[in-house]
Image (cartoon, rainbow, N blue to C red):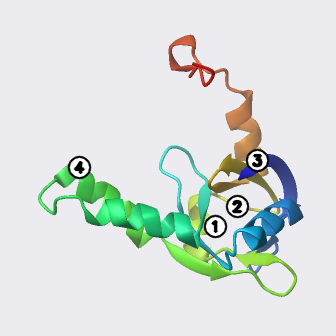
Amino acid sequence: MFFGTYNHAIDAKGRTSLPAKFREALAAAGESKLVLTQYPHWRAVQALPHSVWKELEKRVLETSPLDARAQRNVLRFYSSAQEVDLDVHGRVLVPPPLRAYAALSKEVVWVGMGRTLQLFDKASYDEQMSRDIPADEVVDFFR
């Protein structure tokens, strides 16, 4: 389970350190790879442990090839996906197309989202967090 927010840097080659807490959680789950993809609701990179990716992949492959709405989502989901390994220093190499999509520059923010992670440019994260959630969009997780 991933939770918390961690500020990090990303270098010119696109390398950024995965926070130690997240590396520990991956190791405890026996995960050695992440799949990076575009997050569809805002400009961020979604990072999924390989096992979570495989679960989602099963659901994606069950969609009808004649369902245009589903296929637009499949196109985005698969075409942006990149499998990555952590290097010996615990860094992830974010491919250029994903860096461009999320406008990742020098300062980035890793956010734990339960089963997945998100990687934001710091300015985008700050802007996203400054917005109030409209009352009709607040989810009561305690119900």
* Callout 2–callout 3 Cβ contact below 8 Å: no
Disc nearer the start of the sequence (2/1)? 1
Residue 114, horizontal then vertical, whole percent: 66, 48
Quarter assignment of residue 16: bottom right
* Amino acid on which the number 3 mark rests in the picture: Phe
Q: What distance separates the C-alpha of mark 3 from that of mark 4? A: 31 Å
Disc nearer the start of the sequence (2/4)? 4
Disc 1 on helix, strand or loop? Answer: helix
Residue at x 87% of width, y 82% of height? 89
Q: What distance separates the C-alpha of mark 3 from that of mark 1? A: 22 Å
Residue 125, horizontal then vertical, whole percent: 73, 43
Q: What distance separates the C-alpha of mark 2 from that of mark 4? A: 28 Å
Q: Nearer the viewer, mark 3 or mark 1?
A: 3
Residue assigned mark 1:
99
* Callout 2–callout 1 Cβ contact below 8 Å: yes
Disc nearer the start of the sequence (3/1)? 3
Say few, some or many: other residues with alpha carbon within 10 Å of mark 4 (under 14 / 14 to 19 / 20 or more).
few
* Amino acid on which the number 2 mark rests in the picture: Leu
Q: Quadrant of the C terminus?
A: top right
Quarter assignment of residue 7: bottom right
Residue assigned mark 3:
3
Residue assigned mark 2:
104
Disc nearer the start of the sequence (4/1)? 4
Residue assigned mark 4:
69
Say few, some or many: other residues with alpha carbon within 10 Å of mark 1 (under 14 / 14 to 19 / 20 or more).
many
Q: Nearer the viewer, mark 3 or mark 4?
A: 3
Residue at x 39% of width, y 69% of height? 78
Total label count? 4
Say few, some or many: other residues with alpha carbon within 10 Å of mark 2 (under 14 / 14 to 19 / 20 or more).
many
* Callout 4–callout 1 Cβ contact below 8 Å: no
Q: Nearer the viewer, mark 2 or mark 3?
A: 3
* Callout 3–callout 4 Cβ contact below 8 Å: no
